[in-house]
Amino acid sequence: MDGIKWAFRWAGRQKWRFYTGIFLSLVTVALVMAEPFIFSEIVDDVLMNGEVERLTPLLLTSLGIGAALVCVKYLATLSWEVLSQQIVQGMRRDLFSRIIAQAPEFFRRNAAGDLITKCTGDVDIARHFFCWVLPGMIESLLMAATTLVIFLIIDPLYALCLFVMAPVAAALALRLGKRMRPAHGAVREQRAVLSTVVNENINGIRVVKAFTREGFETEKFTRENERYRDAQLHANKTWLRFAPLIESVSQFLGVINLVVGGLMVISGRVTLGQMQIFTSLAWALNQPMVQMGMFINDAQRFFASCEKLIEIYYCRNPIQSPETPAKVSELRGDISFKNVSLQIGGTDILTDINIEIEAGKTVGFMGPTGSGKTVLASLVPRFADVTRGAVLVDGVNVEHYALPDLRGAVGMTMQDVFLFSAPVEDNIAYGASDAPFERIQKAAEAADADRFVTQLSDGYQTIVGERGTGLSGGQKQRVSLARALLPEPKILILDDTTSAVDMETEKLIQRRLRVLPRKATTLIIAQRVSSIRHADRIYILEDGRVAEQGTHEELMAAKGYYYQTYLLQQGEPAGGDDVGE
């Protein structure tokens, strides 16, 4: 019931449809109950007593009830359908909002395929529950309760004889419910695994083909698909072990009704017309018993999915804006790392980092893979929070800024360039969607993207394939750089931005960045010495610590990691003494 209450919060203004649906179910039951009484009067009064003049009014009444029943059922179905769509629309919207609000760590713990399954398949199960299962259960229970009352009023003994099998059916339905929830939980878990495999292969299709692993991936998918089949079969077999028993129990009602009703008519306890009422309404007891197994099966599927949806819904990003954020009109761009240390999963990533960066200056970061360069830069827009120490922007701890204000002042390019399946213009304008085309073009020119974009089939309106398919690595990097430059951020973080472009293009981009009208505080993370040699200061990170720092000339003179990297990239043997500038 907690799952129903949780999901019902999205009913909103359509909540009245829930009560309307119940009311219409009551009307439906009333109309269904009236029909056998019409037939009873036809049998007792018309057929048995010869009151032929009553036949036409009774038949017209029966037709009227039938027509009214069709209309009421239509309105009830429409009401439940609108309610269910309202619920899942709001549920899907808020789940998506919760997911994209999570920290990067969340996405390392949760596979993309599983999240997709939750936002689509699990939510659709909720729609099915509110549209069909819940109304069906309400109507069946109302039908059974009303029938019981009618039977007890007509003849209690007759009614009790018919209800003798009800406890057996209820016990079987209860056991079915207990078995089905874990079975459906296993099905949805395996469906999520299957979705993850498909998602990974679609996103990594180039790697799969490059290593000719199509056969391997097909086998992996086949294994997971077989496990999904087995989970489905287990759930279906569990249901089949109980459903036929419940249905068989319900079939005894027909036999009991025939025997008991016949004896009571013969003894004169009830009339033939009254027996007709019992016979006509026996399905109102029989049907709920048959359907309850299916309803319980579908309800347990809903509750199993709901557990996963609730888990996501109440998952909170630990990185939040403060309740009373620092007031900011416009950031200058001063950055300070003061005794910064960071642990992730018990592992030291950064240790005692102390760096001061003045507004408008350019700072380079270099170091071996895994030394913490990208993580250090990600602390500025608070993609992670420090374990010890503090990161300051304009002298204020970044944790005191509202996240939209802080991140709105930071432009970033990522190591793994991501472009949306949209026109090039829309990709560049992603962070400033209201920017005029002239600004978009200037940002593209600064990133040296304008040259190749204008040569595309539709220029800036050329649709980029999913994740940038159709563009080379260097082209994607330049579009990504243009996207970062367009909002004219006060802080610019360039993470391996020019690794896929040639040296001449890199020099051109660097030259254009130096002459931008609004100079941003720039943090450049690079593996190439050429990318950061002109930085105002360069920091070399090793094992999460600052191992070297200085200008290009100072680091060359120190003959440490930076010097050795320079030699290797110039094609000279490491350890040489004289290096030409």
Image: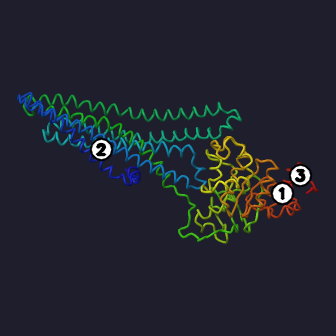
Kind of residue sitting beneath label 1: Tyr
Residue 403 horizontal side relative to residue 236, left or right = right
The residues tagged by marks 2 and 1 sit, at their Cα atoms, a distance apart of 74 Å
**Proximity of marks 2 and 3: CB atoms separated by less than 8 Å:** no
The answer to which of marks 2 and 1 sits earlier in the sequence is 2
Kind of residue sitting beneath label 3: Ala
Query: Which residue position holds label 1?
Result: 562
Expressed as whole percent of the image width and height from the top left, the position of residue 284 reads 24, 36
Label disc, if present, on residue 138 of the rendered structure: 2
The residues tagged by marks 2 and 3 sit, at their Cα atoms, a distance apart of 80 Å
The residues tagged by marks 3 and 1 sit, at their Cα atoms, a distance apart of 11 Å
Secondary element at tag 1? helix
Expressed as whole percent of the image width and height from the top left, the position of residue 202 reads 62, 38
Expressed as whole percent of the image width and height from the top left, the position of residue 100 reads 56, 53
Q: Quadrant of residue 577?
A: bottom right
Q: Is residue 389 visible?
A: no
- Residue pictured at 60% horizontal, 54% vertical: 105
Q: Nearer the viewer, residue 24 or 118?
A: 24
Of the 4 image quadrants, the one containing the C terminus is bottom right
The answer to which of marks 3 and 1 sits earlier in the sequence is 1
Residue 35 horizontal side relative to residue 342, left or right = left
Q: Quadrant of residue 436?
A: bottom right
Q: Nearer the viewer, residue 53 or 398?
A: 53
Classed neighbour count for the residue bearing mark 1: other residues with Cα under 10 Å, few (<14), some (14–19), many (≥20): many
Query: Which residue position holds label 3?
Result: 574
